[in-house]
Amino acid sequence: MAINPMQRRARTSFFQGALLALVIMLVVVLLLVKEMKSINDAKEALEQANSEVYVAASDLKSGVAINMDEDFVLETVRTNVDSSMVISSDDWEFTDENGDIVPKYAEDGTQIYKTLKMKIDVPAGTIVTKEMIYEEGHEIVNSERIQEYNMIILPSTLKNGDHIDIRLTMPTGQDYIVLSKKEVIGTTATGLWLNVTEEEILTMNNAIVESYILPGTKLYAIAYTEAGMQAAAIPTYQVGLEVLDLIGKDPNITDVARKELWDRYNAEARVNYFNTPLSTYVQQQQDRDGSVQGGFQEEVQKVQESRAAFVESLEGTEEIGYTR
């Protein structure tokens, strides 16, 4: 049946309108899909920013020992802090030089953990990172400095991370602890680096001088076998009166440290090497052969001979050298 022009135009307009509506619907659907994708992306990004981390369960004070079970709670919070930087229960565990956990046990079989303390005050709900805590015995004081020593006789197998006592053996057979349980932050065949405080620097200087001006005196280091479990030895070395007087006047030494040194060095009022001014020793040594420099070179040569092979075997590893 023939279609008149009016009907043809009406049908054409209908199809055109339907096609236009379909196009509009497709555009709307595409816009909705795009909007939904943006919303989902934003939601996913928000979820990724939320992490399960340990936060302070209550206000924590600087210098106070902390316990994972009592002082922290696991919460989901929005943060950009990398999870590897946040504290975990592993921080209380002892580790070996490779970072692997090595459990320590007391004589009764109970496991021993590190004692950790806060460096700063933090309010409840704060994310606590590894940089905010420190292990007891590793406190940093204002007067602490990195000092290099290369006149100490070292154990042949000493390496970075070991803990040592520095001792002074006198020609009479007396043996004194000069510095106690110091971590070796760097070592070579001829020396080592330690973190030392102002009073420890003065004490070491006194011991170094005495090790050179008294024939038969030896300044040496001895390593701890299990530093994580062994308590620090108590220093027994007494400085000379001149150094002791300097310690009492030095403004860089805190009142607490000054009192500790004075109490230690004045515990026994006895006459020995240390109660004679160093100037007297120097006078007594003027007629002796050799010099302080000669003694220094001799000690360095001994260290080089005993440690050269061991150090060479560790070249290229983090167990030897100084990289800070």
Image (cartoon, helix red, strand yellow):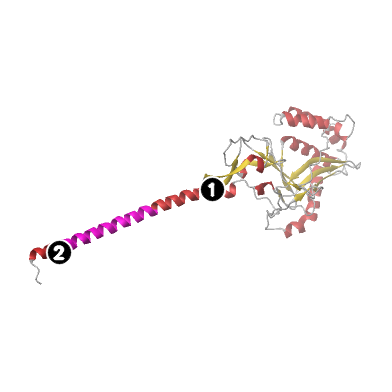
Q: Secondary structure at mark 1?
A: strand
Could you tell me how far apart the alpha carbons at marks 2 and 1 are, in whole angstroms?
61 Å
| Residue extending farthest bottom | 1
Q: Who is closer to the viewer here, 266 or 86?
A: 86
Q: Who is closer to the viewer here, 312 or 268?
A: 268
For the point 42% across and 53% down, the residue is 41
The answer to whether residue 259 of the structure is visible from this angle is yes
Pointer 2: what residue? Answer: 11
- The secondary structure that most of the magenta stretch takes on is helix
Q: Secondary structure at mark 2?
A: helix
Numbered range of the magenta stretch: 13-37
Q: Residue 95 location, x and y as percent? A: 70, 51
The answer to whether residue 246 of the structure is visible from this angle is no
Q: Residue 267 location, x and y as percent? A: 85, 30
Magenta stretch encompasses residue 150? no
Closer to the chain start, of discs 2 and 1, is 2
Q: Who is closer to the viewer here, 126 or 285?
A: 126
| Residue extending farthest right | 172
> Marks 2 and 1: CB-CB under 8 Å?
no
Pointer 1: what residue? Answer: 51
Q: Amino acid at mark 2?
A: Arg
Q: Amino acid at mark 1?
A: Ser
Instruction: Tell me where residue 172 sits by quadrant.
Output: top right
From the image, which quarter does the N terminus lie in? bottom left
